[in-house]
Amino acid sequence: MNTAANATAADVDFYYWPTPNGQKVAIFLEEALVNYRVHPVDIGKGVQFTPEFAKLSPNNRMPAIVDRELDVSIFESGAILLHLADGRFPVGFAARRAADCPG
Ligand SMILES: N[C@@H](CCC(=O)N[C@@H](CS)C(=O)NCC(=O)O)C(=O)O
Protein backbone atom coordinates (compact mmCIF):
# COMPACT_ATOMS: atom_id res chain seq x y z
CA MET A 1 0.00 0.00 0.00
CA ASN A 2 1.12 3.51 -0.77
CA THR A 3 0.86 6.09 1.99
CA ALA A 4 1.80 9.76 2.14
CA ALA A 5 5.05 8.73 3.84
CA ASN A 6 6.23 6.49 1.00
CA ALA A 7 4.44 8.25 -1.84
CA THR A 8 5.46 7.03 -5.27
CA ALA A 9 3.27 6.97 -8.34
CA ALA A 10 0.60 4.35 -7.68
CA ASP A 11 -0.60 2.03 -10.46
CA VAL A 12 -4.09 1.92 -8.93
CA ASP A 13 -6.07 4.41 -6.87
CA PHE A 14 -8.40 2.49 -4.59
CA TYR A 15 -11.56 4.11 -3.22
CA TYR A 16 -12.32 2.15 -0.11
CA TRP A 17 -14.25 1.78 3.10
CA PRO A 18 -13.90 -1.32 5.31
CA THR A 19 -16.97 -3.32 4.37
CA PRO A 20 -16.92 -6.81 2.82
CA ASN A 21 -17.21 -5.42 -0.72
CA GLY A 22 -14.29 -3.13 -0.07
CA GLN A 23 -12.26 -5.76 1.75
CA LYS A 24 -12.40 -8.32 -1.05
CA VAL A 25 -10.73 -5.84 -3.39
CA ALA A 26 -8.25 -4.84 -0.66
CA ILE A 27 -7.29 -8.50 -0.19
CA PHE A 28 -6.73 -8.95 -3.93
CA LEU A 29 -4.58 -5.81 -4.15
CA GLU A 30 -2.42 -7.02 -1.26
CA GLU A 31 -2.12 -10.61 -2.43
CA ALA A 32 -1.27 -9.64 -6.00
CA LEU A 33 1.27 -7.08 -4.75
CA VAL A 34 -0.32 -4.26 -6.73
CA ASN A 35 1.15 -0.81 -6.14
CA TYR A 36 -1.96 1.05 -4.98
CA ARG A 37 -2.99 4.09 -3.00
CA VAL A 38 -6.05 4.15 -0.72
CA HIS A 39 -8.63 6.91 -0.74
CA PRO A 40 -11.09 6.48 2.14
CA VAL A 41 -14.75 6.83 1.16
CA ASP A 42 -16.58 7.28 4.47
CA ILE A 43 -20.01 5.99 3.50
CA GLY A 44 -21.28 6.94 6.98
CA LYS A 45 -20.57 10.58 6.16
CA GLY A 46 -21.99 10.42 2.63
CA VAL A 47 -18.69 10.79 0.77
CA GLN A 48 -20.06 8.37 -1.85
CA PHE A 49 -22.55 11.06 -2.91
CA THR A 50 -19.97 13.75 -3.70
CA PRO A 51 -19.80 14.76 -7.39
CA GLU A 52 -16.08 13.90 -7.48
CA PHE A 53 -16.74 10.33 -6.38
CA ALA A 54 -19.80 9.95 -8.61
CA LYS A 55 -17.54 10.57 -11.62
CA LEU A 56 -15.67 7.37 -10.68
CA SER A 57 -18.59 5.35 -9.40
CA PRO A 58 -21.90 6.53 -10.87
CA ASN A 59 -23.92 4.22 -8.62
CA ASN A 60 -22.53 6.11 -5.59
CA ARG A 61 -21.12 2.96 -4.03
CA MET A 62 -17.66 1.95 -3.13
CA PRO A 63 -15.35 0.15 -3.91
CA ALA A 64 -14.02 1.82 -7.04
CA ILE A 65 -10.57 2.01 -8.60
CA VAL A 66 -8.75 4.13 -11.13
CA ASP A 67 -6.25 2.21 -13.29
CA ARG A 68 -3.62 4.89 -13.87
CA GLU A 69 -1.97 3.21 -16.86
CA LEU A 70 -5.21 2.96 -18.81
CA ASP A 71 -6.68 6.09 -17.17
CA VAL A 72 -9.98 4.31 -16.59
CA SER A 73 -12.21 4.11 -13.53
CA ILE A 74 -14.04 0.92 -12.59
CA PHE A 75 -16.77 0.30 -10.05
CA GLU A 76 -18.55 -2.85 -8.77
CA SER A 77 -16.30 -5.19 -6.83
CA GLY A 78 -16.70 -8.11 -9.26
CA ALA A 79 -15.75 -5.96 -12.25
CA ILE A 80 -12.78 -4.57 -10.32
CA LEU A 81 -11.55 -8.06 -9.42
CA LEU A 82 -11.82 -9.23 -13.04
CA HIS A 83 -9.91 -6.17 -14.20
CA LEU A 84 -7.16 -6.67 -11.63
CA ALA A 85 -6.87 -10.36 -12.54
CA ASP A 86 -5.91 -9.67 -16.15
CA GLY A 87 -2.25 -10.22 -15.25
CA ARG A 88 -1.06 -6.76 -16.28
CA PHE A 89 -0.12 -5.60 -12.80
CA PRO A 90 3.51 -5.63 -11.66
CA VAL A 91 3.58 -9.00 -9.97
CA GLY A 92 0.23 -10.65 -10.56
CA PHE A 93 -0.88 -14.06 -9.42
CA ALA A 94 1.43 -16.18 -11.58
CA ALA A 95 4.52 -14.49 -10.17
CA ARG A 96 3.05 -14.55 -6.68
CA ARG A 97 2.46 -18.29 -6.92
CA ALA A 98 6.02 -18.79 -8.10
CA ALA A 99 7.30 -16.72 -5.17
CA ASP A 100 5.23 -18.63 -2.66
CA CYS A 101 5.87 -22.10 -4.12
CA PRO A 102 9.33 -22.09 -5.73
CA GLY A 103 10.17 -25.17 -7.72
N1 LIG B 1 -22.61 -4.58 -6.04
C1 LIG B 1 -21.67 -3.64 -5.47
C2 LIG B 1 -22.12 -3.25 -4.10
C3 LIG B 1 -21.26 -2.18 -3.49
C4 LIG B 1 -21.92 -1.70 -2.22
O1 LIG B 1 -23.04 -2.10 -1.88
N2 LIG B 1 -21.23 -0.80 -1.51
C5 LIG B 1 -21.78 -0.28 -0.30
C6 LIG B 1 -20.92 -0.62 0.88
S1 LIG B 1 -20.65 -2.38 1.00
C7 LIG B 1 -21.89 1.22 -0.41
O2 LIG B 1 -21.04 1.86 -0.99
N3 LIG B 1 -22.96 1.77 0.16
C8 LIG B 1 -23.16 3.18 0.18
C9 LIG B 1 -24.61 3.51 0.07
O3 LIG B 1 -25.45 2.60 -0.06
O4 LIG B 1 -24.93 4.71 0.14
C10 LIG B 1 -20.25 -4.22 -5.44
O5 LIG B 1 -20.13 -5.46 -5.40
O6 LIG B 1 -19.30 -3.45 -5.45
Image (cartoon, rainbow, N blue to C red):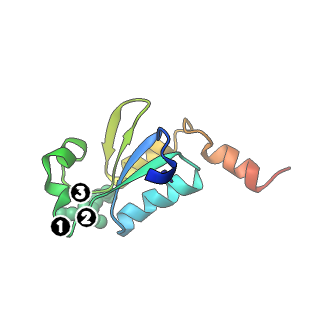
The amino acid at mark 2 is: Asp
Vertical position of residue 87 compared to residue 98: above or below: above
Question: Residue at position x 38%, y 68% from top?
Answer: 20
Residue that lies at the very extreme toward the right in this rendered image: 103
Q: Is residue 10 visible?
A: yes
- Residue at 43%, 49% in the rendered image: 37
On residue 31, which mark appears? none
> Residue, x 44% and y 30% (percent of image)?
69
Q: Earlier in the sequence, mark 3 or mark 2?
A: 2
Q: Disc 1 designates what residue?
A: 45
Mark 3 and mark 2: Cα distance apart in space = 11 Å
Q: Residues within 10 Å of mark 1 (few under 14, many from 20)?
A: few
Quadrant of ligand 1 in image: bottom left
Q: Position of residue 93 (x, y in %)?
A: 62, 47
Relative horizontal placement of residue 27, taking residue 41 as reference (left or right): right
To which residue does mark 2 refer? 42
The residue under the point 44% across, 56% down is 25
